[in-house]
Amino acid sequence: MALLVIPVAVGLGVYFVGRGLTPDANSSLFGARYDDAMSLKASLGTALLGLALVQLVLAARMYGRLPGSKPSSRTVAKIHRFTGLLAFLLSVPIAYHCLTAYGIELTSPRVAIHSITGCVLYGAFAAKVVVVRSHRFPGWMLPVVGGLLFCSIALLWYTAALWQLNGFQTPGL
């Protein structure tokens, strides 16, 4: 269980780095700045949510949790691993831009939820890697950290991509 210190350290590390940075609204994402960068992040975030949904279905298929399915082959596991890697790689430029342009902000409920959830996301990524690689954890731990990872991506999308795509409004916040 000492291995779970790693994900906590990752999440806290992202938080303290983000709080320590001086935000620079001029920072760009693949050359896009300001509103164009926000639109690009909303599109990338939507693609990330799509990959997370694929991950969820593949995980359910791997463990025979879909109606009428049995535990699946190595091919599904390899596709799950590959799409997970793609999701992680897709998240990095989004997070980098968020941190450099805005840092970790706690100025409004939407922004605070988004900032803290971004830290949780990378802690959850680390937790999933730790749990998958170690055989010391109970069987229920992998779906819990996988669910936390999925929920983090969905909440980040809700508090940023949906907000941007919906004319800077988020239902319920």
Image (spheres, rainbow, N blue to C red):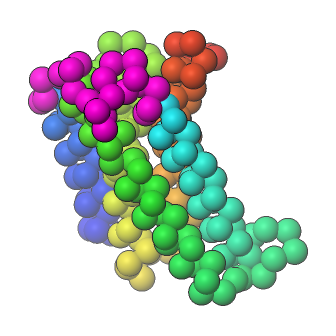
The outermost residue toward the bottom is 73
Q: Answer whether residue 116 is visible to the viewer in this image.
A: yes
Residue visible at 46% across and 26% down in the picture: 39
Taking the image as shown, residue 138 lies to the left or right of residue 1, namely: right
Q: Answer whether residue 124 is visible to the viewer in this image.
A: no
Residue 47: which quarter of the image?
Answer: top right
Provide residue 120's location: percent of width, then percent of height. 38, 44
Provide residue 118's location: percent of width, then percent of height. 37, 38
Q: Does the segment drawn in magenta span residue 12?
A: no
Measured along the vertical axis of the image, is residue 6 above or below residue 18? below
Residue stretch in magenta: 20-41
Residue visible at 12% across and 23% down in the picture: 22
Provide residue 98's location: percent of width, then percent of height. 31, 31
Taking the image as shown, residue 10 lies to the left or right of residue 144, namely: left
Compare residues 36 and 53 and report the one nearer the observer.
36
Quarter of the N terminus within the rendering: bottom left
Provide residue 164's location: percent of width, then percent of height. 51, 20
* Number of numbered discs on residues: 0
Quarter of the C terminus within the rendering: top right
The outermost residue toward the front is 31
Residue visible at 60% across and 18% down in the picture: 166
Taking the image as shown, residue 104 lies to the left or right of residue 113, namely: left
Measured along the vertical axis of the image, is residue 31 above or below residue 167? below
Compare residues 25 and 116 and report the one nearer the observer.
25
Residue visible at 40% across and 23% down in the picture: 36
Taking the image as shown, residue 169 lies to the left or right of residue 91, namely: right
Compare residues 31 and 72 and report the one nearer the observer.
31
Q: Does the segment drawn in magenta span residue 25?
A: yes
